[in-house]
Image (spheres, rainbow, N blue to C red):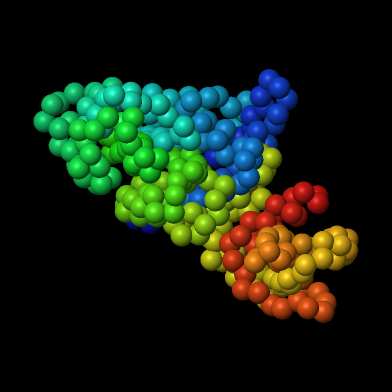
Amino acid sequence: MPENQLTLNISNLSKTYPNGVQALKSLTLSIGTNMFGLVGPNGAGKSTLMRTVATLQDADSGEVSFDGLDVLHQKDAVRRILGYLPQEFGVYPKMSAHDMLDHLAVMKGILKRGERKEMVEGLLQQTNLWDVRKKGLGTFSGGMKQRFGIAQALLGNPKLLIVDEPTAGLDPTERNRFLNLLSSIGRNVIVILSTHIVADVRELCPQMAIISQGDLLLEGSPAQSIDALRGRIWRKTMADAAELTELEKTLHIVSTHLVAGLTEVRVYAEASPGSGFTLADADLEDVYFRNLSRSQRN
């Protein structure tokens, strides 16, 4: 095992909100060094899990440990080695990127001026914000704001970096730039990417988990999960909604979507499910929707 190998262990974590919503149901998960994708629909419990690991809220029961620390009870120690980019974060719109990052560095405990200057300038370079470092954050595009969010999360060289829904709302160019930044952060830390966008996980993460309604549905390698579906995903294009309704009665439908105005249905089956179906190349979306549909049937 490499010297820099880190492990985040989550054991039987549960959380129920006062309104009765059970956000986490005895969830157990082990996450090692590298990029890890946490994927699930909106309301799956991803943000609850991330906020709990980030020491921002308490669980009802369970344990979380990271690098020898009890995350649920040694919160101050965890925060010193944690970087967090929440789904939404506020900035002072008139403050420049440089001054805001410098201010946040002081709050993080980086008090030596020379050390802080080197770190702030290095992060502005790394996140490709150097040329706009003197501009007010209120003028930043969505992608630039997210890159600034990563810069502030990386202050203090964290061992654990959590990013929650970071590409939601970004245009394709900004999304690609942001994903390239995440992939360049390095292999010596744990980076948890929480998202409902399956493509983000496919492009970045060697390990992943799917959760829904607080339950863990799948944990493993995206590539191996796709391999397990090869030869079992079939597709058919149809124009008649009534035909789709009939198929839903007898087949395990993985997903449906529009292609050139027609409905393409993707079905899980060990052999051809019938006339007009052709074998499709399985992908990570098939893994995702297959697991979601199985959980909804149970």
Query: Between residues 285 and 295, which one lies in front from this camera angle?
Result: 285
Query: Between residues 236 and 230, which one lies in front from this camera angle?
Result: 236
Left/right placement of residue 264 relative to residue 75 reads right
Residue 173: quadrant of the picture: bottom left
Q: What residue is drawn where x is 36% and y is 47%?
A: 189
Image position of 100 with respect to 278: above or below? above
**The N terminus sits in image quarter:** bottom left
Expressed as whole percent of the image width and height from the top left, the position of residue 147 reads 34, 42
Query: Between residues 231 and 220, which one lies in front from this camera angle?
Result: 231
The residue lying furthest to the left in this view is 114
The residue lying furthest to the front in this view is 261
Q: What residue is drawn where x is 41% and y is 46%?
A: 191
Expressed as whole percent of the image width and height from the top left, the position of residue 8 reads 47, 42
The residue lying furthest to the top in this view is 18
Query: Between residues 71 and 197, which one lies in front from this camera angle?
Result: 197
Q: What residue is drawn where x is 72% and y is 64%?
A: 263
Q: Is residue 41 visible?
A: yes
Q: Is residue 5 visible?
A: no
Residue 122: quadrant of the picture: top left
Expressed as whole percent of the image width and height from the top left, the position of residue 87 reads 48, 35
Q: What residue is drawn where x is 68% and y is 20%?
A: 18
How many numbered circles does the render carry?
0
Left/right placement of residue 169 relative to residue 251 reads left
Left/right placement of residue 164 relative to residue 103 reads right
Expressed as whole percent of the image width and height from the top left, the position of residue 269 reads 77, 71
